[in-house]
Image (cartoon, helix red, strand yellow):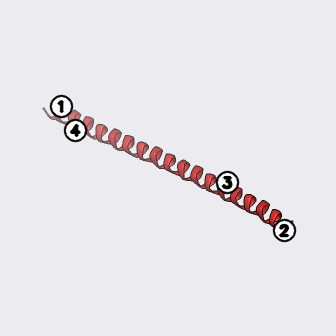
Amino acid sequence: MGFTDDAKDAADQMGDKVKDAWEDTTERVGDKVDEMKADANAKKAEKERDAVHAKNDVKEELRDD
């Protein structure tokens, strides 16, 4: 029974390693998705800021004329 117990333990350890690797991978993917969303939101905010500045500049020019 020693051989079968060793094989079972080895299979359990391998299963644990695979599970840990899967969890790490899914966590990394989730982190990357969050990072990409944050970058997209930052770029959107910058574009909105630039649009507001441009609009305000045009309004200021019209007031000066």
Q: Nearer the viewer, mark 3 or mark 1?
A: 3
Q: N-terminal of the two: label 2 or label 3?
A: 3
Q: Which residue is depicted at the point 57% across and 52% down?
A: 41
Q: Nearer the viewer, mark 1 or mark 4?
A: 4
Where is mark 1, residue-wise?
Answer: 4
Out of 36 and 12, give the one closest to the viewer: 36
Q: In 3D space, how far apart are the residues under numbered discs 3 and 4 (Cα atoms)?
A: 57 Å
Residue type at numbered disc 3: Lys
Secondary structure found at label 1: helix
Q: Which residue is depicted at the point 18% across and 32% down?
A: 3
Q: Quadrant of residue 6?
A: top left
Residue type at numbered disc 4: Asp
Give the crowd class for mark 3: few <14, some 14-19, many >=20 residues within 10 Å. few
Q: N-terminal of the two: label 3 or label 1?
A: 1
Q: Which mark is residue 9?
A: 4
Where is mark 2, residue-wise?
Answer: 64
Q: In 3D space, how far apart are the residues under numbered discs 1 and 4 (Cα atoms)?
A: 9 Å
Where is mark 3, residue-wise?
Answer: 47
Q: N-terminal of the two: label 4 or label 2?
A: 4
Residues tagged 4 and 2 counted as in contact (Cβ below 8 A): no
